Image (spheres, grey):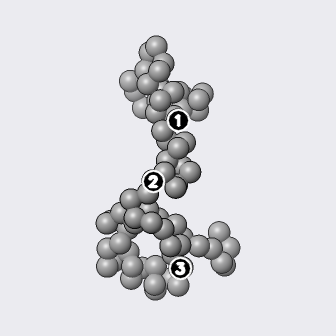
Amino acid sequence: MGLQFLFMDDNTPCHRTVAAEQLLESEDIERMDWPARSPDLNPIEHVWDFLGRRLAARTLPPVTIRELLLALQDE
């Protein structure tokens, strides 16, 4: 990621534990300001939603991990 980057998380409690805070601080990692409970602002949430809808719309949904991997790659 290079020497300068900005860390983004979604403010979930597991990302705000004392241990997580201490790790980021010890590594001198700057955290982006982010509103709590706002998955709609995170673009990857839209990708996961799209993929979930596409998989659910299949006539034969994947039932094994291998089928799921292939279906996700196909979509």
Q: Is residue 5 left or right of residue 53?
A: right
Residue in view at x 46 percent, y 84 percent:
25
Q: Nearer the viewer, residue 56 or 33?
A: 33
**Residue that mark 1 sits on:** 50
Kindly indicate whether the residue at mark 2 contacts the one at mark 3 (C-beta within 8 angstroms). Answer: no
Circle 1 SS class? helix
Q: Earlier in the sequence, mark 3 or mark 2?
A: 3
**Residue that mark 3 sits on:** 29
Numbered tag placed on residue 39 in the rendering: 2
Circle 2 SS class? helix
Q: Is residue 30 above or below residue 51?
A: below
Q: Is residue 37 above or below residue 43?
A: below
Q: Quadrant of the C terminus?
A: top right
Residue in view at x 33 percent, y 65 percent:
14
Q: How many marks?
A: 3
Circle 3 SS class? loop
Q: Quadrant of the N terminus?
A: bottom right
Type of amino acid under label 2: Pro
Q: Please provide percent x and percent y for residue 65.
A: 42, 32
Type of amino acid under label 1: Phe
Q: Nearer the viewer, residue 45 or 24?
A: 45
Type of amino acid under label 3: Ile
